[in-house]
Amino acid sequence: MHSKFIAVGFLITLMLVSGFALLYYDFVSNGNQPSYSWPMYSYNLQHTGSTEGPVVNVSQLLWKYKTGAQVTSSPAIVDGVVYFGSWDNSFYAVDAKNGDLLWEFKTGGNVSSSPTVVNGVVYFGSWDDYVYALNAKNGDLIWKYKTGGSIPSSPEVVNDKIYIGSLDSKMYCLNIKNGDVVWSFKTNNAVYSSPTVFGGKVYFSSTDNYVYGLNAQDGSLLWKFQTGGTMAYAPSVVDGTVYFGCIDDYVYALNAQNGSLIWKFQTGGWIQANSAVANGEVFIGSNDNYVYALDAQSGGLIWKYKTGGVMSASVEYASGMLYFGSGDYYVYCLNATTGKVMSTFETGNTICCSSAVADGHVYIGSDDGYLYALGNNTTPISSSFELYAIVAICLIATACVAVCLFWSKFLYRSH
């Protein structure tokens, strides 16, 4: 009798585990599982270019989508959709799984601005002087605002405001609901730089060779720091320090509160890309063809790796790996600790577009006009939710076995 109860207990346990496994498989295979997103240029409000996720083998092509011109707009990935612009005057939304076109929106100029996707709305700028807000589901225009110059700058959205620079020499703060100007700050030359808005401050640079720190609420000047050249991309802000590279060949670290210099490191060429900051290190590329890993506290060199072309694209970090494109046409995956190459993929032209890392895949554009999706075809265990689900199934199975054994022993003794 005792052995029969044990057998029944194990049978019930097997049925429960199988049921949970089937439900989980259905949940994953239907694409409903939670996924990592990459909602803006350089991933987050601090522009650290740093996230988590599985290691991606970039040598494996999943799909590629052809536009009418080069792609330098870094993609954003939200809810299984990839958003990006092209120099063919179009902005695209494609399915992240297969690259199928979902919708296309025509502007009056090239789109090199990287989009930000927040609460179902896509924000970006164009060389036609406009800032656009589109419905993320269907690409319908919500509003647009015309500045006095072209907009290569990528927007940042904080609460109810959008911040973006323009070649009319201004940094703008707009209302996200209707595009009305909240404030604007005029520099002495064109603003290519994307802003980083964090801790109530706006950090950016102008081609007047100054890096600025503004009050995010009213646009008033808090400080400015003079470099030997312009900074074209957004600074990274981590632990009270502003990190950025400059066309004067230097990587800088400034005090975020007052703009004072903490350290600077000289590379062998112009720096026209954003840095990634993770685990106490700064990763950045230079036009001397090298990617540098620097100590975030001191600016000391940890390692450097030479590619076959200029590095005008930003480096992105994910779970101990670095992902980036180079002027040698290749996409790279490097070990962030050692600088060792883990995998590569060759596109058809120079890469000036920064990558986005989401769902165990790398998305990146090239001057050959394609947006590429690289990585494994299998669905990885890439989120804490999925890991917790598996652990929960194991715990439930263990509990069922324990309960069945207890009742089998109790019934056996009672008889």
Image (tube, rainbow, N blue to C red):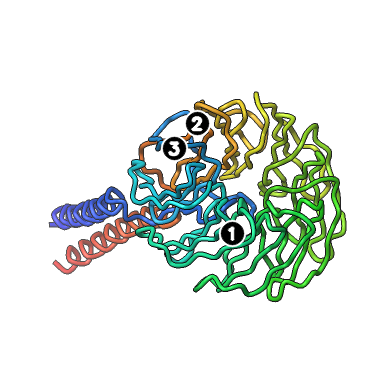
The span from disc 3 to disc 2 (Cα, nearest Å) is 9 Å
Question: In the rendered image, which quarter is residue 247 located in?
Answer: top right
Q: Residues within 10 Å of mark 3 (few under 14, many from 20)?
A: few
The three-letter amino acid code for the residue at tag 2 is Asp
The residue tagged 3 is 68
The residue tagged 1 is 155
The residue tagged 2 is 368
Residue at 77% across / 72% down in the picture? Answer: 220
Question: In the rendered image, which quarter is residue 360 located in?
Answer: top left
The three-letter amino acid code for the residue at tag 1 is Pro
Residue at 60% across / 39% down in the picture? Answer: 322
In the image, 102 versus 409, the foreground residue is: 102
Q: Is residue 200 left or right of residue 179?
A: right
Give the farthest residue toward the top: 308
Q: Are marks 3 and 1 in contact (CB under 8 Å)?
A: no
Q: Secondary structure at mark 3?
A: loop
